Amino acid sequence: MNIKKFFINHKYLLLFISFVLVFFFVYGINIFNNNIWYDEAYSMIVNRYSFTKIISFIIKDTAPPLFAISLKVFSSVFGSKLWVVRILPLSIFLFNFYLAFFPIRKIYNIKVSIIFSLLILTSQISSFAALEIRNYSFSFTFMLASIVYYLLFNKEKKNKYLFLYIIFSLLAAYSHNYCYIGILLFIIINIISSIIKKNKKILISSIIILILCLPWISIIISQSNEISSNFWITKPTMYTFIYSIQYVLSNISIINYLLIILLLISSVICIIKKQKNILLPIIISLGTLILFYIYSYFKTPMFIPKYITTMAGILYLSLAIILSNNKYCYIVFLLLLIYPFYLNICNERLQNDDTSINEMIKLVKDSGTNIFYHEGEFSVGMSEYYFPNSIHYIKEGMPMVVKKPEIFGNIKYINSINSIDEDSFIILYQGREDNYSIQAYDYCLKTSKHFNNYYAGSFNLALFKGCKKELGN
Protein backbone atom coordinates (compact mmCIF):
# COMPACT_ATOMS: atom_id res chain seq x y z
CA MET A 1 0.00 0.00 0.00
CA ASN A 2 1.30 3.45 -0.95
CA ILE A 3 1.39 5.46 2.33
CA LYS A 4 1.87 8.78 0.55
CA LYS A 5 -1.12 8.15 -1.70
CA PHE A 6 -3.22 7.14 1.32
CA PHE A 7 -2.45 10.41 3.11
CA ILE A 8 -3.17 12.44 -0.02
CA ASN A 9 -6.48 10.69 -0.66
CA HIS A 10 -7.61 10.96 2.95
CA LYS A 11 -5.99 14.26 3.97
CA TYR A 12 -9.26 15.96 4.99
CA LEU A 13 -10.40 13.01 7.05
CA LEU A 14 -6.97 12.87 8.71
CA LEU A 15 -7.11 16.59 9.48
CA PHE A 16 -10.55 16.14 11.02
CA ILE A 17 -9.35 13.24 13.19
CA SER A 18 -6.20 15.15 14.18
CA PHE A 19 -8.14 18.17 15.44
CA VAL A 20 -10.60 15.92 17.28
CA LEU A 21 -7.74 14.12 19.06
CA VAL A 22 -5.91 17.35 19.90
CA PHE A 23 -9.09 18.92 21.28
CA PHE A 24 -9.81 15.84 23.37
CA PHE A 25 -6.33 15.66 24.89
CA VAL A 26 -6.27 19.42 25.53
CA TYR A 27 -9.79 19.80 26.96
CA GLY A 28 -11.73 16.55 26.80
CA ILE A 29 -9.43 14.84 29.26
CA ASN A 30 -10.91 17.18 31.88
CA ILE A 31 -14.25 15.37 31.94
CA PHE A 32 -12.88 12.91 34.52
CA ASN A 33 -13.61 14.85 37.70
CA ASN A 34 -16.38 15.11 40.27
CA ASN A 35 -16.88 18.89 40.05
CA ILE A 36 -20.25 20.40 39.28
CA TRP A 37 -21.76 23.83 39.63
CA TYR A 38 -25.35 24.97 40.03
CA ASP A 39 -26.53 25.03 36.38
CA GLU A 40 -25.09 21.57 35.74
CA ALA A 41 -26.53 20.25 39.01
CA TYR A 42 -29.91 21.50 37.85
CA SER A 43 -29.50 19.59 34.55
CA MET A 44 -28.50 16.40 36.34
CA ILE A 45 -31.34 16.60 38.87
CA VAL A 46 -33.96 17.23 36.18
CA ASN A 47 -32.50 14.23 34.35
CA ARG A 48 -33.67 11.94 37.19
CA TYR A 49 -37.31 12.46 36.23
CA SER A 50 -39.48 10.93 33.49
CA PHE A 51 -39.70 12.45 30.00
CA THR A 52 -43.10 14.01 30.71
CA LYS A 53 -41.87 15.53 33.97
CA ILE A 54 -38.73 16.82 32.27
CA ILE A 55 -40.76 18.63 29.62
CA SER A 56 -43.10 20.13 32.25
CA PHE A 57 -40.08 21.43 34.20
CA ILE A 58 -38.23 22.74 31.15
CA ILE A 59 -41.28 24.70 29.97
CA LYS A 60 -40.93 26.71 33.18
CA ASP A 61 -37.19 27.11 32.62
CA THR A 62 -35.49 29.56 30.24
CA ALA A 63 -34.55 27.07 27.52
CA PRO A 64 -36.12 24.74 24.94
CA PRO A 65 -36.25 21.01 25.75
CA LEU A 66 -33.83 19.45 23.24
CA PHE A 67 -30.79 19.17 25.52
CA ALA A 68 -32.75 17.86 28.52
CA ILE A 69 -34.46 15.18 26.42
CA SER A 70 -31.18 14.22 24.71
CA LEU A 71 -29.47 13.97 28.09
CA LYS A 72 -32.23 11.68 29.36
CA VAL A 73 -31.90 9.37 26.34
CA PHE A 74 -28.10 9.36 26.52
CA SER A 75 -27.92 8.66 30.27
CA SER A 76 -30.61 5.98 30.00
CA VAL A 77 -28.37 4.10 27.56
CA PHE A 78 -24.87 4.84 28.89
CA GLY A 79 -25.42 5.70 32.56
CA SER A 80 -25.50 8.91 34.57
CA LYS A 81 -21.99 9.12 35.97
CA LEU A 82 -20.68 12.66 35.64
CA TRP A 83 -17.84 11.83 33.24
CA VAL A 84 -20.13 9.66 31.09
CA VAL A 85 -22.75 12.39 30.79
CA ARG A 86 -20.10 14.95 29.77
CA ILE A 87 -19.34 12.82 26.73
CA LEU A 88 -22.65 14.00 25.21
CA PRO A 89 -21.84 17.74 24.94
CA LEU A 90 -18.21 16.93 24.10
CA SER A 91 -19.10 14.61 21.21
CA ILE A 92 -21.63 17.09 19.82
CA PHE A 93 -19.02 19.84 19.94
CA LEU A 94 -16.43 17.73 18.12
CA PHE A 95 -18.83 17.63 15.15
CA ASN A 96 -17.71 21.22 14.47
CA PHE A 97 -14.42 19.85 13.14
CA TYR A 98 -16.34 17.68 10.69
CA LEU A 99 -18.21 20.78 9.54
CA ALA A 100 -14.86 22.53 9.14
CA PHE A 101 -13.15 20.00 6.89
CA PHE A 102 -16.09 18.88 4.80
CA PRO A 103 -19.03 21.29 4.18
CA ILE A 104 -17.13 24.48 5.14
CA ARG A 105 -14.18 23.48 2.95
CA LYS A 106 -16.55 22.88 0.02
CA ILE A 107 -18.15 26.29 0.45
CA TYR A 108 -14.89 28.18 0.93
CA ASN A 109 -11.47 26.47 0.92
CA ILE A 110 -9.12 24.46 3.11
CA LYS A 111 -7.51 27.65 4.42
CA VAL A 112 -10.82 28.76 5.97
CA SER A 113 -11.29 25.25 7.40
CA ILE A 114 -7.91 25.27 9.15
CA ILE A 115 -8.23 28.84 10.46
CA PHE A 116 -11.73 28.12 11.78
CA SER A 117 -10.54 24.90 13.46
CA LEU A 118 -7.61 26.69 15.10
CA LEU A 119 -9.92 29.48 16.33
CA ILE A 120 -12.30 27.09 18.06
CA LEU A 121 -9.40 24.99 19.37
CA THR A 122 -7.84 28.00 21.12
CA SER A 123 -11.06 29.69 22.23
CA GLN A 124 -12.16 29.72 25.88
CA ILE A 125 -15.73 29.57 24.58
CA SER A 126 -15.09 26.15 23.07
CA SER A 127 -13.77 24.55 26.25
CA PHE A 128 -16.78 25.91 28.15
CA ALA A 129 -19.30 24.74 25.53
CA ALA A 130 -17.76 21.30 25.09
CA LEU A 131 -17.56 20.36 28.77
CA GLU A 132 -20.54 22.12 30.34
CA ILE A 133 -23.53 19.85 31.06
CA ARG A 134 -25.85 22.40 29.54
CA ASN A 135 -27.18 23.19 26.08
CA TYR A 136 -24.24 25.28 24.84
CA SER A 137 -22.49 22.66 22.72
CA PHE A 138 -25.85 22.00 21.02
CA SER A 139 -26.51 25.66 20.27
CA PHE A 140 -22.91 26.35 19.15
CA THR A 141 -22.84 23.37 16.78
CA PHE A 142 -26.40 23.22 15.42
CA MET A 143 -26.60 26.94 14.72
CA LEU A 144 -23.38 26.73 12.71
CA ALA A 145 -24.55 23.58 10.89
CA SER A 146 -27.82 25.27 9.88
CA ILE A 147 -25.98 28.16 8.20
CA VAL A 148 -23.34 25.92 6.65
CA TYR A 149 -25.72 23.44 5.02
CA TYR A 150 -27.88 26.29 3.72
CA LEU A 151 -24.82 27.82 2.03
CA LEU A 152 -23.70 24.42 0.74
CA PHE A 153 -27.11 23.76 -0.82
CA ASN A 154 -26.97 27.13 -2.56
CA LYS A 155 -23.60 26.18 -4.00
CA GLU A 156 -24.13 22.52 -4.99
CA LYS A 157 -27.98 22.34 -5.27
CA LYS A 158 -28.10 18.86 -3.71
CA ASN A 159 -31.33 18.00 -1.92
CA LYS A 160 -29.54 16.21 0.92
CA TYR A 161 -28.04 19.54 1.97
CA LEU A 162 -31.47 21.15 1.91
CA PHE A 163 -32.73 18.38 4.19
CA LEU A 164 -29.79 18.94 6.56
CA TYR A 165 -30.51 22.67 6.55
CA ILE A 166 -34.05 21.92 7.78
CA ILE A 167 -32.93 19.38 10.39
CA PHE A 168 -30.14 21.49 11.89
CA SER A 169 -32.30 24.63 11.88
CA LEU A 170 -34.89 22.81 13.99
CA LEU A 171 -32.23 21.33 16.27
CA ALA A 172 -30.76 24.80 16.77
CA ALA A 173 -34.13 26.43 17.44
CA TYR A 174 -34.95 23.88 20.13
CA SER A 175 -31.52 23.97 21.77
CA HIS A 176 -31.46 27.55 23.11
CA ASN A 177 -33.79 30.55 23.03
CA TYR A 178 -31.04 32.71 21.49
CA CYS A 179 -30.85 30.19 18.66
CA TYR A 180 -34.64 30.19 18.36
CA ILE A 181 -34.59 33.93 17.65
CA GLY A 182 -31.53 33.49 15.43
CA ILE A 183 -33.28 30.83 13.35
CA LEU A 184 -36.41 33.01 13.03
CA LEU A 185 -34.23 35.85 11.77
CA PHE A 186 -32.46 33.42 9.42
CA ILE A 187 -35.61 31.97 7.85
CA ILE A 188 -37.27 35.39 7.50
CA ILE A 189 -34.24 36.50 5.48
CA ASN A 190 -34.37 33.25 3.49
CA ILE A 191 -38.10 33.58 2.76
CA ILE A 192 -37.70 37.15 1.51
CA SER A 193 -34.60 36.22 -0.50
CA SER A 194 -36.22 33.11 -2.02
CA ILE A 195 -39.29 35.10 -3.11
CA ILE A 196 -37.08 37.69 -4.81
CA LYS A 197 -34.89 35.02 -6.45
CA LYS A 198 -37.88 32.69 -7.09
CA ASN A 199 -36.15 29.82 -5.31
CA LYS A 200 -39.06 27.49 -4.48
CA LYS A 201 -37.00 24.88 -2.63
CA ILE A 202 -35.57 27.35 -0.15
CA LEU A 203 -38.96 29.01 0.24
CA ILE A 204 -40.77 25.75 0.99
CA SER A 205 -38.06 24.44 3.34
CA SER A 206 -37.95 27.76 5.23
CA ILE A 207 -41.73 27.73 5.64
CA ILE A 208 -41.51 24.14 6.95
CA ILE A 209 -38.96 25.26 9.54
CA LEU A 210 -41.15 28.22 10.51
CA ILE A 211 -44.24 26.04 10.96
CA LEU A 212 -42.35 23.48 13.07
CA CYS A 213 -40.90 26.28 15.23
CA LEU A 214 -44.27 27.90 15.94
CA PRO A 215 -45.36 25.50 18.75
CA TRP A 216 -42.61 26.93 20.96
CA ILE A 217 -43.47 30.60 20.39
CA SER A 218 -46.13 30.84 23.12
CA ILE A 219 -43.81 29.12 25.60
CA ILE A 220 -40.89 31.42 24.84
CA ILE A 221 -43.18 34.42 25.38
CA SER A 222 -44.32 32.93 28.69
CA GLN A 223 -40.69 32.31 29.69
CA SER A 224 -39.83 35.89 28.79
CA ASN A 225 -42.64 37.18 31.00
CA GLU A 226 -41.39 35.02 33.88
CA ILE A 227 -37.87 36.39 33.39
CA SER A 228 -39.10 39.98 33.51
CA SER A 229 -40.54 39.36 36.97
CA ASN A 230 -37.50 37.61 38.48
CA PHE A 231 -34.13 36.98 36.86
CA TRP A 232 -30.54 37.29 37.98
CA ILE A 233 -29.15 39.12 34.93
CA THR A 234 -28.63 42.86 35.27
CA LYS A 235 -28.91 45.59 32.64
CA PRO A 236 -25.92 45.56 30.22
CA THR A 237 -23.31 48.32 30.45
CA MET A 238 -20.18 49.30 28.57
CA TYR A 239 -18.31 46.76 30.69
CA THR A 240 -20.65 44.05 29.36
CA PHE A 241 -19.55 44.98 25.84
CA ILE A 242 -15.87 44.89 26.83
CA TYR A 243 -16.27 41.51 28.56
CA SER A 244 -18.03 40.22 25.44
CA ILE A 245 -15.02 41.09 23.28
CA GLN A 246 -12.72 39.44 25.83
CA TYR A 247 -14.90 36.36 25.84
CA VAL A 248 -14.69 35.98 22.05
CA LEU A 249 -10.98 36.89 21.69
CA SER A 250 -8.87 36.76 24.87
CA ASN A 251 -8.64 38.09 28.42
CA ILE A 252 -5.53 40.13 27.61
CA SER A 253 -6.31 43.71 26.53
CA ILE A 254 -3.15 44.46 24.54
CA ILE A 255 -3.56 41.24 22.54
CA ASN A 256 -7.20 42.11 21.86
CA TYR A 257 -6.23 45.54 20.48
CA LEU A 258 -3.82 43.87 18.07
CA LEU A 259 -6.37 41.22 17.07
CA ILE A 260 -8.99 43.89 16.34
CA ILE A 261 -6.52 45.85 14.18
CA LEU A 262 -5.75 42.70 12.19
CA LEU A 263 -9.47 42.03 11.76
CA LEU A 264 -10.07 45.57 10.51
CA ILE A 265 -7.25 45.25 7.96
CA SER A 266 -8.55 41.84 6.85
CA SER A 267 -12.10 43.20 6.59
CA VAL A 268 -10.97 45.91 4.18
CA ILE A 269 -9.17 43.31 2.07
CA CYS A 270 -12.26 41.09 2.26
CA ILE A 271 -14.41 43.91 0.86
CA ILE A 272 -11.91 44.70 -1.88
CA LYS A 273 -11.82 41.03 -2.92
CA LYS A 274 -15.64 40.86 -2.79
CA GLN A 275 -15.59 37.76 -0.60
CA LYS A 276 -18.68 35.63 -1.18
CA ASN A 277 -20.82 33.97 1.50
CA ILE A 278 -19.64 36.25 4.30
CA LEU A 279 -22.65 38.51 4.92
CA LEU A 280 -25.10 35.84 6.05
CA PRO A 281 -22.98 34.44 8.93
CA ILE A 282 -22.24 37.98 10.14
CA ILE A 283 -25.86 39.16 9.90
CA ILE A 284 -27.29 36.14 11.76
CA SER A 285 -24.68 35.97 14.54
CA LEU A 286 -24.22 39.69 15.23
CA GLY A 287 -27.86 40.46 14.41
CA THR A 288 -29.15 38.00 17.02
CA LEU A 289 -26.73 39.16 19.70
CA ILE A 290 -27.44 42.84 19.02
CA LEU A 291 -31.21 42.22 19.23
CA PHE A 292 -30.80 40.61 22.66
CA TYR A 293 -28.38 43.34 23.79
CA ILE A 294 -30.81 46.11 22.81
CA TYR A 295 -33.78 44.27 24.35
CA SER A 296 -31.76 43.75 27.53
CA TYR A 297 -30.85 47.43 27.71
CA PHE A 298 -34.31 48.88 27.14
CA LYS A 299 -36.62 46.20 28.55
CA THR A 300 -35.73 42.90 30.29
CA PRO A 301 -32.03 42.03 30.88
CA MET A 302 -31.32 38.80 28.99
CA PHE A 303 -27.74 39.31 27.81
CA ILE A 304 -24.45 38.27 29.39
CA PRO A 305 -21.19 37.40 27.58
CA LYS A 306 -21.71 33.66 28.24
CA TYR A 307 -24.70 33.64 25.90
CA ILE A 308 -22.44 34.59 22.99
CA THR A 309 -21.60 30.87 22.99
CA THR A 310 -24.86 30.25 21.10
CA MET A 311 -23.62 32.25 18.10
CA ALA A 312 -19.90 31.64 18.57
CA GLY A 313 -19.64 28.95 15.88
CA ILE A 314 -20.93 31.36 13.24
CA LEU A 315 -18.82 34.20 14.66
CA TYR A 316 -15.61 32.17 14.40
CA LEU A 317 -16.56 31.07 10.89
CA SER A 318 -16.96 34.76 9.97
CA LEU A 319 -13.56 35.58 11.48
CA ALA A 320 -11.96 32.68 9.59
CA ILE A 321 -13.43 33.85 6.27
CA ILE A 322 -12.28 37.44 6.87
CA LEU A 323 -8.77 36.45 7.99
CA SER A 324 -8.27 33.99 5.12
CA ASN A 325 -8.00 36.87 2.66
CA ASN A 326 -4.52 37.81 3.85
CA LYS A 327 -1.94 35.23 4.94
CA TYR A 328 0.10 37.70 7.02
CA CYS A 329 -2.97 38.78 8.99
CA TYR A 330 -4.16 35.28 9.82
CA ILE A 331 -0.66 34.02 10.66
CA VAL A 332 -0.04 36.90 13.10
CA PHE A 333 -3.60 36.60 14.44
CA LEU A 334 -3.15 32.91 15.25
CA LEU A 335 0.31 33.48 16.75
CA LEU A 336 -1.16 36.09 19.09
CA LEU A 337 -3.65 33.49 20.35
CA ILE A 338 -0.91 31.10 21.54
CA TYR A 339 -0.45 32.71 24.96
CA PRO A 340 -4.23 33.04 25.68
CA PHE A 341 -4.55 29.42 24.57
CA TYR A 342 -1.90 28.40 27.09
CA LEU A 343 -3.69 30.33 29.86
CA ASN A 344 -6.96 28.66 28.91
CA ILE A 345 -5.36 25.21 29.20
CA CYS A 346 -4.00 26.13 32.65
CA ASN A 347 -7.43 27.37 33.69
CA GLU A 348 -9.07 24.13 32.60
CA ARG A 349 -6.49 22.12 34.54
CA LEU A 350 -7.33 24.08 37.70
CA GLN A 351 -11.04 23.43 37.15
CA ASN A 352 -10.27 19.73 36.94
CA ASP A 353 -9.16 19.59 40.60
CA ASP A 354 -12.01 18.01 42.61
CA THR A 355 -10.13 17.50 45.89
CA SER A 356 -12.26 20.01 47.81
CA ILE A 357 -15.53 18.56 46.48
CA ASN A 358 -14.54 15.06 47.55
CA GLU A 359 -13.56 16.36 51.00
CA MET A 360 -16.96 18.05 51.31
CA ILE A 361 -18.77 14.85 50.30
CA LYS A 362 -16.83 12.84 52.89
CA LEU A 363 -17.53 15.41 55.61
CA VAL A 364 -21.28 15.34 54.93
CA LYS A 365 -21.40 11.53 54.80
CA ASP A 366 -19.45 11.28 58.07
CA SER A 367 -21.90 13.70 59.71
CA GLY A 368 -24.70 11.18 59.30
CA THR A 369 -27.29 13.74 58.18
CA ASN A 370 -28.84 14.63 54.84
CA ILE A 371 -30.81 17.63 56.12
CA PHE A 372 -29.85 21.05 54.74
CA TYR A 373 -30.82 24.62 55.50
CA HIS A 374 -30.46 27.05 52.59
CA GLU A 375 -29.98 30.77 52.39
CA GLY A 376 -29.24 30.73 48.65
CA GLU A 377 -30.27 28.76 45.57
CA PHE A 378 -26.70 27.62 44.81
CA SER A 379 -26.59 25.19 47.72
CA VAL A 380 -30.00 23.64 46.97
CA GLY A 381 -28.84 22.25 43.62
CA MET A 382 -25.37 21.32 44.81
CA SER A 383 -26.54 19.41 47.90
CA GLU A 384 -29.37 17.58 46.13
CA TYR A 385 -27.04 16.45 43.34
CA TYR A 386 -24.32 15.07 45.63
CA PHE A 387 -26.78 13.82 48.28
CA PRO A 388 -29.99 12.67 46.53
CA ASN A 389 -33.29 12.56 48.42
CA SER A 390 -32.13 15.05 51.05
CA ILE A 391 -34.44 17.29 53.07
CA HIS A 392 -34.10 20.97 52.16
CA TYR A 393 -35.30 23.71 54.51
CA ILE A 394 -35.72 26.98 52.66
CA LYS A 395 -36.64 30.30 54.22
CA GLU A 396 -39.90 31.74 52.89
CA GLY A 397 -39.23 34.43 50.30
CA MET A 398 -35.70 33.29 49.42
CA PRO A 399 -35.09 34.43 45.79
CA MET A 400 -34.95 31.54 43.33
CA VAL A 401 -34.50 31.62 39.55
CA VAL A 402 -36.01 28.14 39.21
CA LYS A 403 -39.77 28.51 39.01
CA LYS A 404 -40.52 24.98 40.25
CA PRO A 405 -38.29 24.32 43.30
CA GLU A 406 -39.92 20.91 43.73
CA ILE A 407 -37.41 19.80 41.08
CA PHE A 408 -34.96 19.56 43.97
CA GLY A 409 -37.04 17.01 45.84
CA ASN A 410 -38.12 17.32 49.47
CA ILE A 411 -38.49 21.10 49.96
CA LYS A 412 -39.79 22.49 53.25
CA TYR A 413 -40.48 26.20 53.66
CA ILE A 414 -39.92 27.77 57.08
CA ASN A 415 -40.17 31.27 58.56
CA SER A 416 -36.71 31.19 60.11
CA ILE A 417 -33.90 28.80 60.95
CA ASN A 418 -35.36 28.46 64.45
CA SER A 419 -38.34 26.63 62.92
CA ILE A 420 -36.15 23.61 62.16
CA ASP A 421 -36.91 20.64 64.37
CA GLU A 422 -34.19 18.10 63.58
CA ASP A 423 -31.36 16.42 65.47
CA SER A 424 -28.84 18.05 63.13
CA PHE A 425 -28.60 19.96 59.85
CA ILE A 426 -26.00 21.31 57.44
CA ILE A 427 -25.62 24.69 55.80
CA LEU A 428 -23.71 25.03 52.53
CA TYR A 429 -23.13 28.64 51.61
CA GLN A 430 -21.03 30.59 49.17
CA GLY A 431 -18.23 32.72 50.55
CA ARG A 432 -14.49 33.17 50.81
CA GLU A 433 -13.96 32.71 54.52
CA ASP A 434 -14.97 30.17 57.12
CA ASN A 435 -16.60 32.68 59.45
CA TYR A 436 -20.23 31.64 59.49
CA SER A 437 -22.32 32.91 62.39
CA ILE A 438 -25.95 32.08 63.02
CA GLN A 439 -28.59 32.67 65.65
CA ALA A 440 -30.25 29.29 66.11
CA TYR A 441 -31.76 28.27 69.42
CA ASP A 442 -31.05 24.76 70.68
CA TYR A 443 -28.31 24.13 68.08
CA CYS A 444 -24.54 24.24 68.38
CA LEU A 445 -21.98 24.58 65.62
CA LYS A 446 -20.03 21.31 65.54
CA THR A 447 -18.03 21.56 62.33
CA SER A 448 -17.28 24.43 59.99
CA LYS A 449 -14.95 24.29 57.01
CA HIS A 450 -14.08 26.42 53.99
CA PHE A 451 -13.65 24.82 50.54
CA ASN A 452 -11.94 26.57 47.66
CA ASN A 453 -13.05 24.90 44.44
CA TYR A 454 -11.98 26.58 41.21
CA TYR A 455 -14.87 25.07 39.24
CA ALA A 456 -17.84 25.47 41.58
CA GLY A 457 -16.49 28.51 43.42
CA SER A 458 -15.59 29.07 47.05
CA PHE A 459 -18.08 27.75 49.56
CA ASN A 460 -18.36 26.80 53.20
CA LEU A 461 -19.99 24.02 55.15
CA ALA A 462 -21.39 24.34 58.67
CA LEU A 463 -22.76 21.36 60.64
CA PHE A 464 -25.17 22.09 63.50
CA LYS A 465 -26.32 19.61 66.12
CA GLY A 466 -28.90 20.01 68.81
CA CYS A 467 -27.87 21.24 72.23
CA LYS A 468 -29.91 22.66 75.06
CA LYS A 469 -28.54 26.16 74.96
CA GLU A 470 -28.55 29.14 72.66
CA LEU A 471 -25.60 29.26 70.27
CA GLY A 472 -22.94 31.66 71.50
CA ASN A 473 -23.65 31.29 75.27
Image (tube, rainbow, N blue to C red):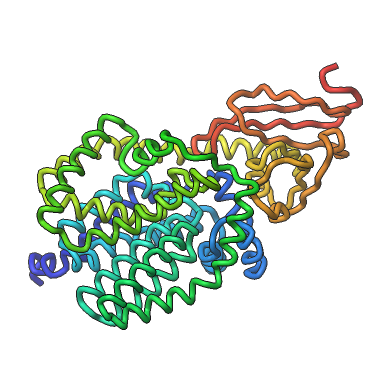
Direction from residue 420 to residue 273 in the image, left or right: left
- Give percent across and percent down for residue 191: 35, 73
Confirm whether residue 78 shows in the render: no
Q: Residue 112 or 353: which is nearer the viewer? A: 112
Name of the residue lying farthest toward the right = 468
The quarter in which the N terminus is drawn is bottom left
Residue at 72%, 35% (x, y): give it.
427
Q: Is residue 298 above or below residue 207?
A: above
Confirm whether residue 384 shows in the render: yes
The quarter in which the C terminus is drawn is top right
Q: Is residue 254 above or below residue 306?
A: above
- Give percent across and percent down for residue 383: 67, 44
Q: Quadrant of residue 335?
A: top left
Residue at 29%, 45% (x, y): give it.
122
Residue at 12%, 49% (x, y): give it.
269
Direction from residue 46 to residue 133 in the image, left or right: left
- Give percent across and percent down for residue 301: 53, 45
Q: Residue 33 or 348: which is nearer the viewer? A: 348
Residue at 10%, 56% (x, y): give it.
273
Q: Is residue 69 above or below residue 436?
A: below
Q: Residue 76 or 313: which is nearer the viewer? A: 313
Direction from residue 460 to residue 19 in the image, left or right: left
- Give percent across and percent down for residue 58: 61, 61
Q: Is residue 226 above or below residue 76?
A: above
Direction from residue 302 to residue 364 in the image, left or right: right
* Count of numbered labels shown in the rendering: 0
